[in-house]
Image: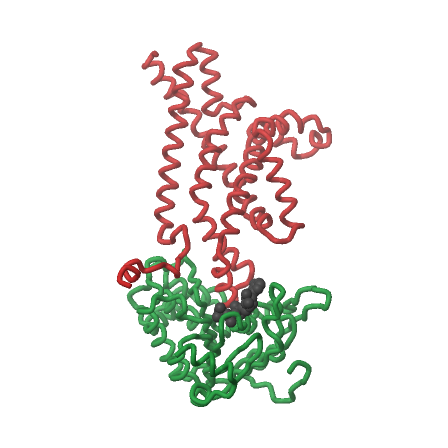
Amino acid sequence: MPGAPKVQQIPMHGIRAERIEKRLGGNDVLRGMDIDVRPGEILSILGSSGSGKSTLLRCLNLLTIPDRGDIWIHGEKLAIRAASQHGGPAAILDQRQVRKARASVGMVFQSFNLWPHKTALENVTEGPVLIKGLRRNAAADLGHHYLAKVGLSGKADSYPHHLSGGQQQRVAIARALAMEPRVLLFDEPTSALDPELVGEVLRVMAALAGEGRTMVIVTHEMAFAREVSTRAAFMHRGLIEEESPPRQFFFSPVSSRLRGFLASHR
Amino acid sequence: MDISLLLTSTLTLAGGIPLTLLLTFASLLAGLVLAVPLAFMRASSCKWLSLPVLAYTYVLRGTPLLVQLFIIYYGLGQISAIRSSVLWVLLRDPFWCCLLAFSLNGAAYTTEIFRGGIQAVSNGMIEAAQAVGMSPLQIKRRIIFPIAFRSVLPSYANEVISLVKATSLASTVTLLEITGLSRKLVSETFAPYEIFIAAGVLYLGLTFLLTGFFHLLETRLNGAPRAEARPHRVDLQQVAHE
Ligand SMILES: Nc1ncnc2c1ncn2[C@@H]1O[C@H](COP(=O)(O)OP(=O)(O)OP(=O)(O)O)[C@@H](O)[C@H]1O
Ligand SMILES: [Mg+2]
């Protein structure tokens, strides 16, 4: 609950957020959320629409600036000024620090958000070239490597609008991977896809999970969350209502809301 | 109509093409250099940045280019501070006055065109760039501007073509570009019909070439679509089967 400071050690890797609050459009979207993602963990976040899952994920790399609360990325606390009582917005205090943190946290969006004027390969290499200063050649090798990894070796020179949704989302995953992030955030990566394209994206994600990567996945794919995650969390109205290993989460949930949610998503 | 006169005057007037093109491309370039930062300011949510630019584009788009040219050519010389400054070396020359007027005017239109393109870039494109750690400047340069430029290319091409035609106003301040040459030729031959038709043909030719160029540029850049990808596309076949 808000107010109670924790005296646990801050892990050097992974992400921790404490007492995150965010108000959007007059709603308290996040109401003092705590979340802790340790290296190698695969955390699935479930919850009904509007419960604040996307907002939480966006707060973790500061695409949305939380009104209050602290965030540590790989042990480094992000410098954020809290929103004032009088409605002054929260602000990033150290832009460089946040950019560095973002570069080490990959994000995959529901709507892919590929850059339409760049080929698949250019989408993947843009970050490494601009942020890490990779030479064109080295970046291209890297790009081909990650495109191959998501099964798109042959599509390097295709533009996004020539790719299917599933292919676009896999390019987006390769784009995130090419920054060699230590944590990957997925916001409903398959929700915008035609049903027959969901599988190819989930397979890529399962393979990543198998490599021991750290991942936070907001999803409505129950079977996938059950198989792949090491921990699952259920969000309800801006708070985590229940959080447990997948076996317990899916087969013996405690909260009646989670039970209802699981029943309605059978 | 005297066809041979039409042909010979077309050849004579072609001598004005270099000046017409120089005026066009020089003011195009200057206008572009001005318009890109102005467009970002104009698209900014900060009022202190966007309102002054709005005032600028409002005034320059709300008054005739000819009036602006006359103010610069006849008006600025009245100000003694300008007459005594180094600027006067340029401003007493009609060529530079034209260049200034066309650049400032073109920049105003171009700014508004680009502003539309910049504001139409979807937030998702920008967030994806932020998420890999790009700086605001990198995002503008590598993501927003290229996407915006592609989406406004057809409107920008129109603006360039209007500019070609607008350079004919330079004839009013003694420059001998295509129109200036025509007027001179008319005063010598008293054959306005053939000569102005010849001038028209030349402008038409330039417009034709430029249209072709922009068409080519568009298909060249067209690996990238004007509209962004639509992930929510409905699969018609699938619907039909259900
Ligand atoms: N920019 C915004 N302005 C106003 N309200 C917002 C904004 N973003 C989100 N909200 C509101 O905040 C609430 C939580 O939104 P959020 O997108 O985090 O939910 P979600 O759990 O991801 O839902 P979904 O499953 O539909 O993606 C919703 O009620 C939404 O309407
Ligand atoms: Mg969401």
Residue B220, relative to residue A194: is it above or below? above
Q: Residue at left 56%, top 47%?
A: B39
Residues B86 and A210: in front is A210
Give the image location of residue B140, x and y in percent: 52, 56
The way the protein has been coloured in the rendering is by chain
Give the image location of residue B60, x and y in percent: 60, 35
Decide if residue B67 is in sight here.
Answer: yes
Q: Which corner quadrant of the image does residue B206 belong to? A: top left
Residue A262, relative to residue B51: is it above or below? below
Q: Is residue A23 left or right of residue A48?
A: right
Residues B215 and B92: in front is B215
Image colour assigned to chain B: red
Residue A79, relative to residue B29: is it above or below? below
- Letter of the green chain: A
Give the image location of residue A76, x and y in percent: 60, 79
**Residue that lies at the very extreme toward the top in this rendered image:** B190
Decide if residue A100 is in sight here.
Answer: no
Q: Is residue A70 left or right of residue B224?
A: right
Residue B215, relative to residue B101: is it above or below? below
- Quadrant for the N terminus of chain B, please: top left
Q: Is residue B106 left or right of residue B221?
A: right
Give the image location of residue A181, x and y in percent: 47, 75
Residues B168 and A164: in front is A164
- Quadrant for the C terminus of chain B, please: bottom left
Q: Is residue A90 left or right of residue B204?
A: right
